[in-house]
Image (tube, helix red, strand yellow):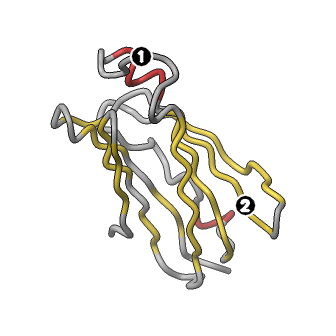
Amino acid sequence: MATGYLSTHVLDTARGVPAEGIKIALYKVTGNSHRKIAETVTNADGRTDTPILPAEKFQTGTYELIFFTGDYLRETGQAGEDPLFLDQIPIRFGMADQDAHYHVPLLLSPYGYSTYRGS
């Protein structure tokens, strides 16, 4: 059985705080097919309460996280005019090691973002 798992968090780099209340959806990607396998919301620390993909459901493969940032940017007064520049942010990535902890954070500002493989 795999012992790997996937976690994520969101930091609001424009305000210098964790981003609370951002909905995140996780999809398994196979070719042109996307299958939603999890959905959660960030807590006060900008993290999810549990891994978005826990060890008991972990499989290697290609995945996509979609961060629904629009409502958060509106609520924090950072949105600007509609349509928003960053309403939804997709991050596609691969996980090849069935026993690894993958951490894919989002560093967010109203007009830019970055990500990396964290620990």
The answer to whether residue 62 is left or right of residue 112 is right
Residue type of the residue flagged with mark 2:
Lys
Which residue: 45% across, 42% down? Answer: 49
Tag 2, which secondary structure? strand
The answer to whether residue 102 is left or right of residue 95 is left
Q: Which residue is mark 2?
A: 28
**In the image, residue 28 above or below residue 75:** below
Which residue: 68% across, 63% down? Answer: 57
Residue 25 location, quadrant: top right
**In the image, residue 51 above or below residue 47:** below
**Label 1 neighbourhood size at 10 Å, few (<14), some (14-19), many (20+)?**
few
Which residue: 29% across, 43% down? Answer: 11
In percent of width and height, residue 74 lies at 40, 17
In percent of width and height, residue 84 lies at 47, 26
Tag 1, which secondary structure? loop
Residue type of the residue flagged with mark 1:
Glu
Look at the image and tell me in which quarter the N terminus lies.
bottom right
Q: Which residue is mark 1?
A: 81
